[in-house]
Amino acid sequence: MNIHSINANTSMVNNQRTGSKNELGQQQFLQLLVAQMRNQDPINPLDGAEFASQLAQFNSVEQLISVNQGLKSLQESQDLMSASLNNSMAATLTGKQAKVMTNEIHLSDGEPVHLKFELQTGADEIEVIIRNASGSEVRRETIPGMPSGENEWSWDGKNDAGATLFDGTYTVELKAKSSGSPVSSMMFLEGVVEKVRFTGDGVFLSVNNIQVPIGDVQEIRNTPKEI
């Protein structure tokens, strides 16, 4: 009769990842142990010291599994606590002045929209391309060169033909160059946080009718009081 060493089974438990479908639990291990003892060769029985050693190894594996499960539960609790804290803090942002990264702008009642952007270095050539919600280009404008840092340009809400466009959300693409080489730029929006939305995809702030992930917030400050 073939006798398989209990060491092989314990090594298999050691080598498999925690949570694997093939991992032997305590009940399965005991069933295997009983079956092996029943079928051991009477002429060559299991050595007592070796048997005790295998049990100790199995016990160590069980303890490690328990520790890993405990750490996983602790991490989940910390994640929930962190999310709850972030949500509570986000709820206090309503009414605050915010600076957020976005390439979207909202046109309302044909009023001019102030495009704000930051240039890494000065640019001698800047092209602004505005597209509607369907992605169609509605306005392309070349503006004079500007220095590094924060800059601003006002869009009159009209297309290339001079017609006033419908209210809604538009996207802006900025192409800046210096001596023919591209200049890194970042579009941003400044305005009052109108509301905070909690969704399955995260927390979003509504600033000037634009929905922005809270992770894109660059700056928050109190709204200046009117005199």
Image: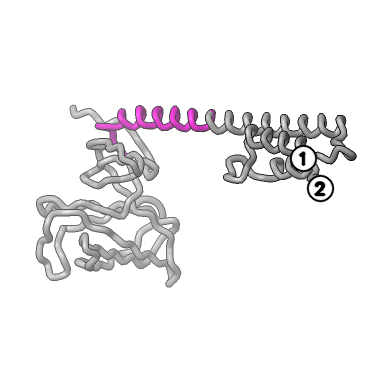
Rendered image quadrant of residue 21: top right
Q: Indicate the position of residue 65 as horizontal and vertical percent values.
A: 64, 33
Rendered image quadrant of residue 55: top right
| Label 2 packing within 10 angstroms: few (<14), some (14-19), many (20+) | few
User: Left or right: 67 with respect to 185?
Assistant: right
Residue found 37% across the figure and 45% down from its top: 216
Residue where numbered disc 1 is placed: 39
- The main secondary structure of the magenta stretch is helix
Q: Indicate the position of residue 79 as horizontal and vertical percent values.
A: 47, 32
Residue where numbered disc 2 is placed: 1
Q: Secondary structure at mark 1?
A: loop
Decide which of tag 1 and tag 2 comes sooner along the chain.
2
Tell whether position 94 is magenta. yes
Q: Indicate the position of residue 83 as horizontal and vertical percent values.
A: 41, 32
Q: Amino acid at mark 2?
A: Met
Are dots 1 and 2 in contact, CB under 8 Å?
Answer: yes
User: Left or right: 106 with respect to 49?
Assistant: left
Rendered image quadrant of residue 191: top left
Q: Secondary structure at mark 2?
A: loop
How far apart are the two marked residues, 1 and 2, measured between alpha carbons? 8 Å
Residue found 67% across the figure and 35% down from its top: 31
Q: Which residues are magenta?
A: 74-98
Residue found 71% across the figure and 37% down from its top: 35
Residue found 24% across the figure and 52% down from its top: 105
When the figure is inspected, residue 113 is found, relative to residue 97, above or below; the finding is below
When the figure is inspected, residue 61 is found, relative to residue 158, above or below; the finding is above
| Label 1 packing within 10 angstroms: few (<14), some (14-19), many (20+) | few
Comparing 65 with 110, the one in front is 65
Q: Amino acid at mark 1?
A: Asn
Comparing 92 with 6, the one in front is 6
